Amino acid sequence: MQIKELKKQIKLNPNIQVCIISHASSGFYLVQIRDGAEVNLLSNWRGQQRVFRSLDQATSELKHQGINRAVLLSHVANDEMIGREPFYKGLNSAALNLCF
């Protein structure tokens, strides 16, 4: 889902959850959009996943587009080693609400 599609969806359905996913072992952040059972990642115009290099960069882009709330999910690779599902398949990590 591209950012312009996300803006339209939020206007139609304000209950859409926007998540910023962080990886503990790297400095990369993804934006995940949850609408009920449907889960999408923010993509660029080529259809590739949009990757941000910092939390500030991700929140600044969302704020610039008029989105003022998100949930921060932190993924630790060790979760998979102990039998937990990866973060993008379920809410297994602690969520931190962000307002910007």
Image: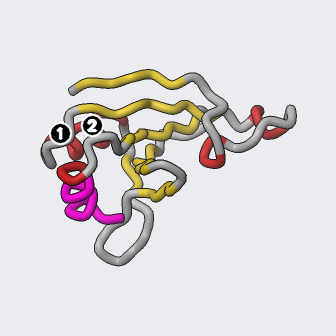
Q: Quadrant of residue 8?
A: bottom left
Q: Which residue is mark 2?
A: 59
Q: Which residue is mark 1?
A: 63
Q: Residues within 10 Å of mark 2 (few under 14, many from 20)?
A: many
Main SS, magenta region, reads helix
Q: Is residue 74 above or below residue 57?
A: above
Q: Residues within 10 Å of mark 1 (few under 14, many from 20)?
A: some
> Residue at (79%, 36%) from the top-left corner?
84
> Residue at (33%, 24%) from the top-left corner?
98
Task: Confirm or deny contact between disc 2 and disc 1 (CB under 8 A).
Answer: yes
Looking at the picture, tell me which residue is in the foreground, 10 or 1: 10
Tell me how many marks there are: 2
State the SS at label 2.
helix
> Residue at (24%, 49%) from the top-left corner?
10
Q: Amino acid at mark 1?
A: Lys
Residue 70 picture location, percent across and down: 34, 34
Looking at the picture, tell me which residue is in the foreground, 24 or 39: 39
Split into 4 quadrants, where in the image is the N terminus? bottom left
